Image (cartoon, rainbow, N blue to C red):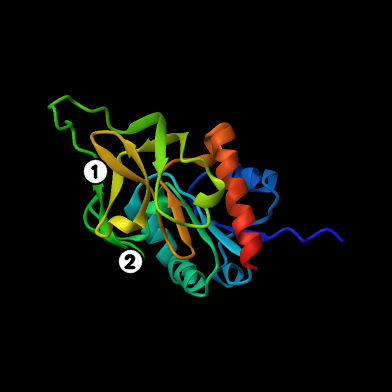
Amino acid sequence: MPSIPPLVSVVDYGAGNLRSVAKALERSGATVEVSGDPASLGRADGLVLPGVGAFADAAANLRAKGLDEAVVAAIRDGRPYLGLCLGLQLLFDEADEHGLTRGFGLIPGRVERFPDVDASGARMRIPHIGWNQVNFRGEHPMLEALPERDTYYFVHSYRGVARRPEDVVGVAEYAGEFAAAVARGNVFAVQFHPEKSQNAGRRLLDAYVAWVAACR
């Protein structure tokens, strides 16, 4: 008898490329529900929080809909969480984008804008847009299914700065080394967009859906 695909909820807080993320997860074998209903998040086997745009706007939208508490509750209940771009940044304590804004506080640290110049004094183009290699490190169930390095598509002006080095499980280079992936327990989040990263992104989403299925 074939196994039932895991149910993954893509959090709809009024912003983000939700449909392309949902379609990519379906191709990886998940049953996908795009939902802005806090109650439905607790019924899903796994949770994906995608995002584009400003940290402050995303945080305000999540709080206005009661989704911030629902996301944190689902994580604390042990549901595998995948954060994409802003979905990574919102895990941190705070961000200084458009004024200081509080995040979920699940990864100690803060979100800061890329510097305008690198250590050599060369000017940087902000936002960081395009393909970049990510080197994975550390231990996590997601990493067991991924190559040690792969190339993904990024679009962002801000980067998460973790206080605990062990929370950073993937790094890339732009104006110096930055956190391209963070993880702690049932949380895994990436700064890049797997739904735009072709085969590398498919490998990552395949790994996530398999992880969710194994955790049911």
In what quadrant of the picture does the N terminus appear? bottom right
Placement of 109 over or under 147, stated as above or below: below
Q: Where in the figure is residue 79, as x and y percent of width and height?
A: 55, 67
Query: In the rendered structure, which disc, 1 or 2, sits on the residue that comes first in sequence?
Result: 2
User: Residue drawn at (36%, 66%), measured in percent from left and top?
Assistant: 106
Front residue of this view, candidates 181 and 112: 181
Mark 1 sits on what residue?
Answer: 113
Of the residues shown, which amino acid type is indicated by label 2? Gly
- Using the image, tell me which numbered label, if any, was put on residue 167: none
Front residue of this view, candidates 14 and 175: 175
Local packing at callout 1 (Cα closer than 10 Å; few below 14, some 14-19, many 20+) is some
Mark 2 sits on what residue?
Answer: 105
Q: Is residue 183 left or right of residue 210?
A: left
State the image quarter where residue 104 is shown.
Answer: bottom left
Q: Is residue 3 left or right of residue 56?
A: right
Determine if residue 41 is in view. yes
